[in-house]
Image (cartoon, rainbow, N blue to C red):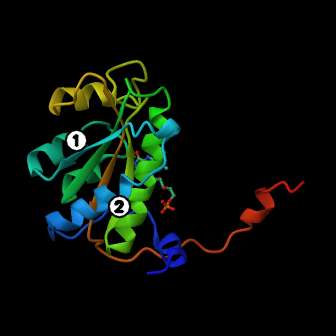
Amino acid sequence: MTFTEILNRRRSIRRFTSQKIDRNLIDRLLKAAFTAPSSKNTRSTRFMVVENPDLLARIAEMRDFGSAFVKDAPLAIVVLGDTSATDLWVDNCAISATILQLAAVDEGLGSCWVHVNGRPRKREEPDGETATEWLREILPIPENWQPLCVIALGYPDGEIKPHSEKNDLEQVIRL
Ligand SMILES: Cc1cc2nc3c(=O)[nH]c(=O)nc-3n(C[C@H](O)[C@H](O)[C@H](O)COP(=O)(O)O)c2cc1C
């Protein structure tokens, strides 16, 4: 697939078939994500690979909005940053997660970013328990690692069309 095809095909996929993802393929995705640039080459991004259905169901409960579909994904990769390595761990994680999602397209997979950092578990309780606190309860996350997001992955169940051409270039200031 050309890079342009990958970019055009990438859509957020939230419905997956039950087909498992080969271990070697998962490793290729992780290796792709590790190619990400990072501030001062701190390489602060870490990953947690979750295939256990019980854990996937618990991850899905991390928020009462926008994360339920993780329960039916065959794979979730938690993207975390080592906060002791850099203050720019969020930025580094975001780049790594994006490359992971693009690599997934190249492998015929679909994926969706599910946000963690700064989100409450319950939409109506913005100051209540956070999604991060919940993940720390259910996953063995080292103290100095902070989750930015979970990338849900699997073989797409159905097609989502590429975005139609928009007038994005109108958002650009040329000097
Ligand atoms: C920072 C960020 C946070 C997101 N959080 C969620 C989320 O919590 N749940 C979800 O279903 N989708 C989430 N998404 C996916 C967006 O909803 C999606 O990218 C957007 O609607 C555009 O659709 P597309 O990815 O198909 O182009 C997130 C995407 C980004 C980049």
Q: Name the residue at 39% across, 51% down.
A: 113
Q: Which residue is mark 1?
A: 59
Q: Quadrant of residue 138?
A: top left
| Residue 88 screen position, x and y as percent | 50, 31
**C-alpha separation, residue under disc 2 versus residue under disc 1:** 15 Å
How many numbered dots are placed on residues in this image? 2
Name the residue furthest bottom: 1
Q: Is residue 70 above or below residue 106?
A: above
Disc 2 or disc 1, which is closer to the eye? Answer: 2
Residue sitting nearer the eye, 94 or 76: 94
In which quadrant of the rendered image does the N terminus lie? bottom left
Tell me which numbered mark, 2 or 1, is placed earlier along the sequence: 1
The residue at which mark 2 appears reads as: 111
Left or right: 135 as drawn, with respect to 165 = left
Q: Nearer the viewer, residue 141 or 152?
A: 141
Where in the figure is residue 5, as x and y percent of width and height? Answer: 50, 78
Front-most of residues 63 and 146: 146
